[in-house]
Amino acid sequence: MFSDSVIMLLVLAIVVIILFVKTAVVVPQRSEYVVERLGKYHNTMGAGFHILIPFLDKITYRRSLKEEVMDIPSQTCITRDNVAVGIDGVLYIQVVDAKLSAYGIENYYVAASQLAQTSLRSAIGKIDLDKTFEERETINRQVIEAVDEAAQNWGIKVLRYEIKDIAPPASVMEAMERQMKAEREKRAEIATSEGDRQARINRAEGMRQEAISVSEGEKQKRINEAEGRSREIELLAQATAQGLQAVAAALASDGGVTAANLRVAEKYLSEFGNLAKAGNTMILPANLADIAGIVGTAMTVMQDVGVKKAG
């Protein structure tokens, strides 16, 4: 009898332990569990320890609140200029409402992926091929806005979308490479021509500055020469005036007239002698013998000058 009671107690204890293990739930951090009671939504359990009612409560959905990364497979998109390109990407999403993610849609992974692909095709169809490489940020933003608007009813938040690769056809790639090569050659030609143009401008400017410097130098030279000639004439005039003053002073002194007479006579005879040596033909003045008269005339002029000077 005792042994049967012990066995029953042991069995009961085991059943209780099993029930406790089955009904006691520990929800990890950044996770939520959706609980249904008799097939109907009951509550959402957050992180921590929870006890369920046996046979009534059941954990139906387990959701992680961490950011999730979805790989969007490559697809063919047609650009506005009718070029087919292969594009793949990465979508970053996060569950913000476990209940909506469980009951708002059957599979939010598939829904988000499909919507991202259709939104990408729509965005690519609005731009030309050349712009697809330049407008990545714009395309990413358009995909995020389209998916996030629909995902609000699914309890999902779209955080980011990034295009991983854009693969145009081989023929288009070759054409783009030729275009880029031509553009680079064009820029090189423009740079060369601009350099040559600047060099010509610099040389012309240098020649202009040189011509200005030469003309300025010539101008200054002529000014200096003119000033020199002016100074020379001025000094010569001053010297002549001083000489005349000295002659006048000498004539006014004692014996000055006699000395002047002798000097004039000597000069007259000397010049007449030089005239005779200069040529074969010589014209003689009519009053050649009257040397004293000539000297007297000259002295009269000197005396008049001296008197005027003294007066």
Image: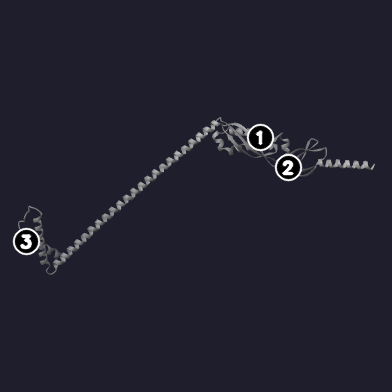
Can residue 235 be seen here? The reply is yes
**Residue corresponding to mark 1:** 113
Can residue 311 be seen here? The reply is no
Q: Is 132 placed left or right of 254 in the picture?
A: right
Residue at the image point whose x is 40% and y is 44% from the top:
199
Q: Residues within 10 Å of mark 1 (few under 14, many from 20)?
A: some
The type of residue carrying mark 3 is Ile
Secondary structure category for the residue under label 2? strand
Q: Residues within 10 Å of mark 3 (few under 14, many from 20)?
A: few
Q: Nearer the viewer, residue 94 or 310?
A: 94
Secondary structure category for the residue under label 3? helix
CB under 8 Å between callouts 3 and 2?
no
The type of residue carrying mark 1 is Ser
Q: Is 271 placed left or right of 180 in the picture?
A: left
Q: Which mark is residue 291?
A: 3
Q: Which mark is residue 31?
A: 2
In three-dimensional space, the C-alpha distance between marks 1 and 3, rounded to whole angstroms, equals 141 Å
Residue 182: percent from the left, percent from the top? 48, 35
